[in-house]
Amino acid sequence: MASLPVKDEGTDGEKAVDIDSLIKSREDMFPDERTPTTLFDGIPFQEMPICNIRVSPNNTIFTLSDAKGLPVMCLLESKYVSFSFVIGTIKMLRSCGIEGFKNARKGTNIAAQATAISISTKALERGYKTVRVRIRGLGPGRMSAIKGLQMGGLNIISITDSTPVSWNPPRA
């Protein structure tokens, strides 16, 4: 490639990667019409448990639910919180506040990662090994929550971002 510098001691390790060839070789990583019936660890994708992550600037809430059911209401930290984004029956619920982080520390990425490791170890104890992840909201714990689930031992097969987008935001 003409754009790469001449090979010398300063360019060791540099190389160009053709992204298009990598994507064409991994066409199975994009969903298609066979995805709902595809087996992961012997379980069809459409019956896989879902780990819902609700991220806000002040807290991160994790729920583990099955793939079927209706939206539910939960009692969380002395308040009723509507989990309208949860589809399924809740099997487990953890938040940074339940985990022991208080006040401003609940909204940190470290709190989200520690809570994710905690819920993933509890999920493994109950027999859940492979999950789908549905994440919603904006906050510092988005990426560290997913990383914590993976560090805790869960096998993540799908990540879906269901953050609502306003099509007519308020005027400035």
Image: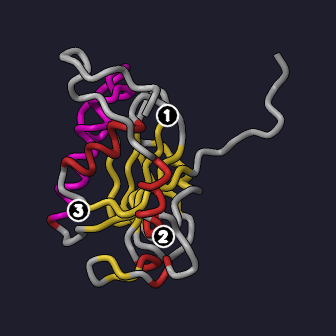
Residue 88 — which label?
2
**Residue wearing tag 3:** 123
Q: Does the magenta stretch include residue 75?
A: no
Please provide percent x and percent y for residue 20: 50, 51
Q: What element carries label 1?
A: loop
Which image quadrant is residue 130 in? Answer: bottom left
Labels 2 and 1: the sequence-earlier one: 1
Q: What residue type is labelled 1?
A: Ser
x, y percentage for residue 75?
44, 52
What's the magenta region?
Answer: 97-124
Query: Alpha carbon of mark 1 to alpha carbon of mark 3: how far?
Result: 23 Å
The residue under label 1 is: 56
Coloring applied to the structure? secondary structure
User: Label 2 amino acid?
Assistant: Gly
Write the residue at 53% across / 66% down: 87
The quadrant holding residue 42 is bottom left
